[in-house]
Amino acid sequence: MGVEYILLSNNNLTGSLPPFLFNSHNLVVLSLSRNNFHGELPSNIGNATTLSVLGLVDNNFSGKLPASIVNIYALTLLCLSNNKFSGNTLPDFRSNEHLQLIDLSSYEFSGEIPTNFSHHTRILALGKNNFSGNLSRNLIHLGKLEYLDIHDNKITGELPNFICQISTLHTLNLRNNPLHGSIPNCISNLTNIQILDLSNNYLVGEIPAKFGNLVVMETTINFSYLNLSYSVASIHLNVDLIIKKNNIDDVTIIWKKSKQDLSLDRLKIYYLLDLSIVKL
């Protein structure tokens, strides 16, 4: 029986990842966040088909994501933010039906906003990249999406009406993009929204009167935002725990010049509407 869990986060480890690490048929969790690893990810990363959690946050990895990464069919959490990955295309994750949390923020990715993710995706963090162009209508196919963060990119065009069809959204963060035009009236269809951040864009016109229909922002509700449990061998790992281990704080609130990072596992207590620095 081989090693199932490798938890080496919060150290000062260096070097590149050895390819033999991904030849394991037993590895379930690989957490190497907040170290000083560098170089490209091994091309054989897809050999680790039993890997459920891959956390490489806050390192110096570079290059493109290996195409074989989509062969990790058991992958549930992919947390790779704050590295130096680049490229204008991403691997096609649509066949990764277990993959629910994808954090590819703070890279140097470019091109159009990718939508080649599984319809089981619940959390998609793509902030602080160089993505450009209009939002793709294919986002509506992510039928379980609760958290969409594309802040600090170069997304252009108007805020499209089809965004209102993603009724499962609890958090929508499009801050710091050159979006223009008006806020669509149908935004009131997002009845589950708790955090809506459209600040630092070029929006014009009036605030839709139907904003008053966003009742979740008005009332306190009790829902488990990240109650995603999955079975690993004979035990259950909770996504909340992995998020805490990887320190995912991808919602940054700037309120009266004060910046505050909100952890995903505590989003259930926050209700926020930010339209600041827009030309309403």
Image: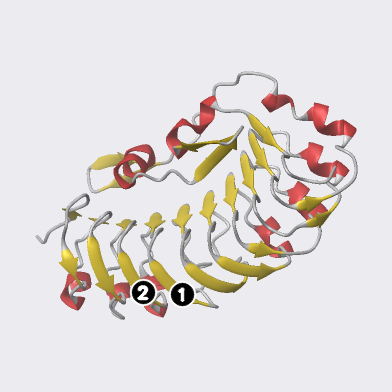
Which amino acid type is marked by label 1? Ser
Q: Is residue 194 left or right of residue 277?
A: left
Q: Which residue is mark 2?
A: 62
Structural distance between the alpha carbons of marks 1 and 2:
7 Å
Q: Residue at x 59, y 50 (%)?
A: 148
Residue ranking furthest to the front:
257
In x, y percent, where is residue 165?
76, 49
Q: Is residue 137 left or right of residue 265?
A: right
Q: Residue at x 87, y 37 (%)?
A: 208
Q: Which residue is mark 1?
A: 86
84 above or below 104?
A: below
Residue ranking furthest to the top:
220
In x, y percent, where is residue 126?
54, 58
Callouts 1 and 2 close, C-beta under 8 Å: yes
Where on the picture, by quarter, is residue 188? top right
Residue in the foreground of this view, choosing between 43 and 264? 264
Q: How many marks?
A: 2
